[in-house]
Image (cartoon, grey):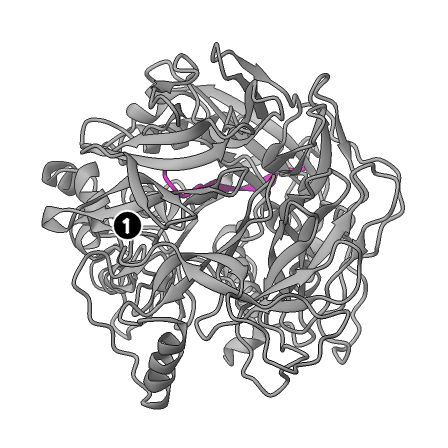
Amino acid sequence: MSAQTAETQTEIPSHPSADAATEQKPAPATPFHDLDHYVSIPRLSGLALSPDGTRLVTAVATLNGKGTEYRSALWEVDPAGERPARRITRSAKGEAGAAFSASGDLFFTSARPDPEKPDDEPVNALWLLPRDGGEARVVVSRAGGVAKVLSARAADATFVQAPVLPGSSDEANDEERRKARKDAKVAAILHSAYPVRFWDSDLGPDEARLFAVERSAKEAEPGKPGTVDEGPDLELRNLTPGIGNGLMFGEATVSPDGSTLYAGLVRPLAKADLRMELVAVDVATGTRRTLLSKDGIDFFPGPVSPDGTRLAVVVEPQTTPTQSYTSELHLLDLESGEFRRLAGDWDRFAHPAEWLPDGSALLVTADDAGRSPVFRIDAASGAVTRVTLDDAAYTDVVVAPDGASAYALRSSYLFPAEVVRIDLVTGDVTRLQNPVERPEIPGRLEEVTATAADGSPLRAWLALPPSSVSTDAGHEAAADTAGQAKHPLLLWIHGGPIGSWNAWTWRWNPWLMVAQGYAVLLPDPALSTGYGQDFIQRGWGRWGAEPFTDLMTITDAALERPDLDAERTAAMGGSFGGYMANWVAGHTDRFRSIVTHASLWALDGFGKTTDLAQFWAKEMDDAMTEAHSPHRAVGEIRTPMLVIHGDKDYRVPIGDGLRLWYELLSESQLATDAEGRTPHRFLYFPDENHWILKPQHAKVWYGVVNAFLAEHVLGESRELPKELGL
């Protein structure tokens, strides 16, 4: 593993107190030794670069005073790396969605009150911060709010994505209808198409539309006085009426000259199926034209070339029980209609980020062996060149106007997302002066490799404590007879399953467990990205086969180390990782405890109740579902399990968690005794979804997990979070 070093610089201190009234505690060794300190670490997301390349803006989320939710603010980072970062927005409601106009003004969305209309009920409105400084002002406010901002790179053209009640004739009528529903306290939604939910959101009653933000056609009122700081009256023009829920996935991009919007549009099909089409929307007329549409294939728009003649398109053939997920990068010539695959021989999934200014190449990111570097793909030849050479993962890549450098958010398991500058010639990466400092981590990171039974190479990250580490309870890691510290091992299984452990995560952060004295193994088994199509195919429709045996093989390889304790191990996972934790529980008793979060249990029931059942129907046939459903092995479970589920989880509905809990208590080898006692536990969140997003609940989540693992892996008793009221 290559070294990761930060430059010496002046930074703004991070980790504000979650509540000034909270009793002061001794400073923890690192932020990961104290959950209050951990959840208060500021978090960066998103990146926007002004057209002239002089301003770089990111969002920083911080904990509110009560410690119950995060609020984001916009910060400006100096692209040259010479000046400290500075905060440019401030409000109790927070700001997000930064997008620069061609003239350098900064658009963003916020639900903070409009100072010009203090009595109005706040909604998520479109705000503008002038390039020359001054106060931000509301430019568009509507009853349904604004969800997303798009701006043209080379023209004064701005667009928003916003929800509309489908029966509304205009904006005034939409406001009236919303008010009527609210006043009548009606929450009912009548559906006529599939799906009705997506991840953690109910679809409807409103539907997404794309609007042009334009100067009002109405003349100013006669005699109305003007002021020097007054901006032009703006209004919205609906560019996509009558599209139903076609924009439910929110895929859209704009041409540099602002004349055309390109959108991925959902087309409903027979038997509750759907596919994604690629359409072009003419901004001047609102005319919509289908560019790409084909049965069994989904098309997603990428960036438009600087000259407006070519569009990057991500093509995803729909899966079948025998054909695994794949993703291909294509170029569409918008003048001739030529459609060709780009870098077809490259065995990776490219996520297009941005064109170079001369249109010669695309910058993309792609998972690659536990990393996610930046790559350059030549637009003519399709030749692929790796740009960044470190062990990090990159997102939000934007290119400087001169094409010599790019900016991005970079993270790894050694540090959370931070703003960096990339030299596109040398690949050198410079950490800029960020809004927050890197948190100190309580250990070190290494790699583990192994070989699967079929010869496939396997790898994993291993987060380790220092050679001798004490837990917060004051117990040092057990030592063997030679005095070598031996750490208990936690096997963490990633979700997806199409994914990889390659970037910092706030939800499943290994350093919180390392701070407790554990070593955390983060493997990429079959179905993981970054190892080629065959690596995914070998586990496709065989969830309980190669993915499971790969996990056991890489765990065995890790436990050959003298500093790990094979007698004290546990397995954990969420979503697909939770599925696999359930499968592990029914097919081996090698682990002392298992934590399963938002997990698939009975695949026959899950397949029809998940939010997008039509995708699941194409992934596994009935025989596969039956053969690889964890619930069939409930009678073999001999390991204490902690089940965690949120009631608002639409991807893996709560029914799976409830059935798992009942069958554990009634049919497992550790079912309840004559007095109803069981070693299993169920942590239930009535108001969380597939993820645990509220900071107070994240602390409860880790507190319960720590106590459960301490009891069964370490043989220790830990207090449960007092917030549980137990």
Q: How many marks?
A: 1
Compare residues 594 and 272 and report the one nearer the observer: 272
Mark 1 lies on residue: 637
Of the 4 image quadrants, the one containing the N terminus is: top right
Please tell me whether residue 215 is drawn above or below residue 297 in the rendered image: below
- Disc 1 is placed on an element classified as loop
The quadrant where residue 279 appears: top left
Q: In this image, 192 relative to 93: left or right?
A: left
Across and down, in percent, residue 375 comes to: 57, 22
Residue 602 against residue 671 in the figure, above or below: above
Residue under the image location 21 percent in, 37 percent down: 619
Q: Does the magenta stretch include residue 494?
A: yes
For the magenta stretch, what is the residue range? Answer: 485-499
Residue drawn at the location 36% of the way across and 28% of the way down: 327
Q: In this view, does 55 lie to the left or right of 522?
A: right
Asked if residue 474 can be seen in this view, the reply is no
